[in-house]
Amino acid sequence: ELKRALVACKVFIFYPVYWVVYNQMLNNFISQAGQMQLHGIPNDLMQNIDPLTIIIFIPIMDRLVYPGLRKMGIAFKPITRIFWGFLLGALAMAYAAIVQHLIYSAPPCYNAPSACDAGLLPDGTYEVNHVHVAVQTPAYLFIGLSEIFASITGLEYAFTKAPPSMKSFIMSMFLLTNAFGAALGAALSPTAVDPKLMWMYIGLTIASAAAGCIFWLLYRRYNATEESMNELEQYGEKAVPANEVVPVHHHSIDEKGGEDPNGISRADQAV
């Protein structure tokens, strides 16, 4: 059981990098939308694309994609899914860097959005750069897909691989990685300013892709032991396998004072 717990905890080591990427949706993506032409749409409305992506694609993955891959002989096991989650997170950051480049390339303020004299309006506000906010949509789509592969699979892995007596502990360790991710994000906050934002997204792209590749190289062997680890879970909840049952022998004790095979003592028989 301890070995299973350690395996689960080791798999979570790279998750803080993923949470830094994921949390961009909750802060810097909103600020990025505020630098674009909204046409009456609130800039924080765009983040609703993420839950919509999850709601739409989870049934598609469970009912069509995963069964289809199994029929083709492709085992899309948890470690593989988490790996693809990291890569999709990297893709989201790469696309966000492209969007930021488009913003910095557009008038009126270029790499100083809403902070230049050319964009100052008579009412004292600033005109945003001429990029439509819809351009940002794929970034949220990629983040949502990465969440299906990395976040949801991570929760599944934490629950199914933890021994029955340690499920709460392992789940809390998985959730703790989010706190470490938030701390890393706070450390990166000095780079989350114009005109550095594009380079921050590029850095996160490299970090997420590198973390995913290292994760795959270190833990891909656990895909091969997936079924055996799940069998341990079944044994822990139902019964001990037959080949592990210790036989109990009933010994008859000799005639000088003991039991016969029926369990009646010689002394009792004499009485």
Image (spheres, rainbow, N blue to C red):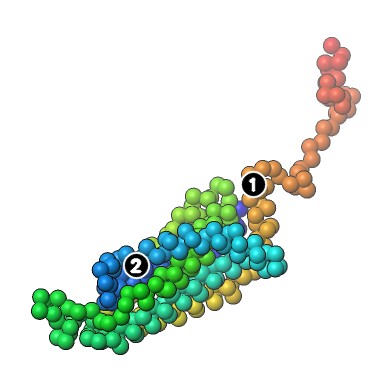
SS of the residue under disc 2: helix
Q: Is residue 210 left or right of residue 233?
A: left
Depth check: 225 or 255 in front? Answer: 225
**Residue drawn at (10%, 75%), measured in percent from left and top?**
123
The residue carrying mark 2 is: 46
Which mark, residue 42?
none
Question: Which of the 4 image quadrants contains residue 178?
Answer: bottom left
Q: Check residue 236 in the rendering and tell me which mark sits there, or answer none.
A: 1
Q: Nearer the viewer, mark 2 or mark 1?
A: 2
Q: Residue at x 53, y 50 (%)?
A: 166
Mark 2: amino acid: Met
Quarter holding the C terminus is top right
Q: Residue at x 56, y 62 (%)?
A: 61
Q: Residue furthest top?
A: 271
SS class of the residue under badge 1? helix
- Percent from the top left, x then y, of residue 185? 35, 71
State whether residue 139 appears in this view: yes
3D distance between C-alphas at marks 2 and 1: 45 Å
Q: Is residue 198 above or below residue 228?
A: below
Say few, some or many: other residues with alpha carbon within 10 Å of mark 1 (under 14 / 14 to 19 / 20 or more).
some
- Residue 66 lies, with reference to residue 194, above or below; the image says above
Q: In the image, residue 267 lies at what x, y percent? A: 83, 17
Number of numbered tags placed on the structure image: 2
Question: Closest to the observer: 258 or 261?
Answer: 261
Q: In screen coordinates, is 124 left or right of 73?
A: left
- Residue located at (39% from left, 72% from top): 137
Indicate the position of residue 54 as horizontal and vertical percent values: 47, 61
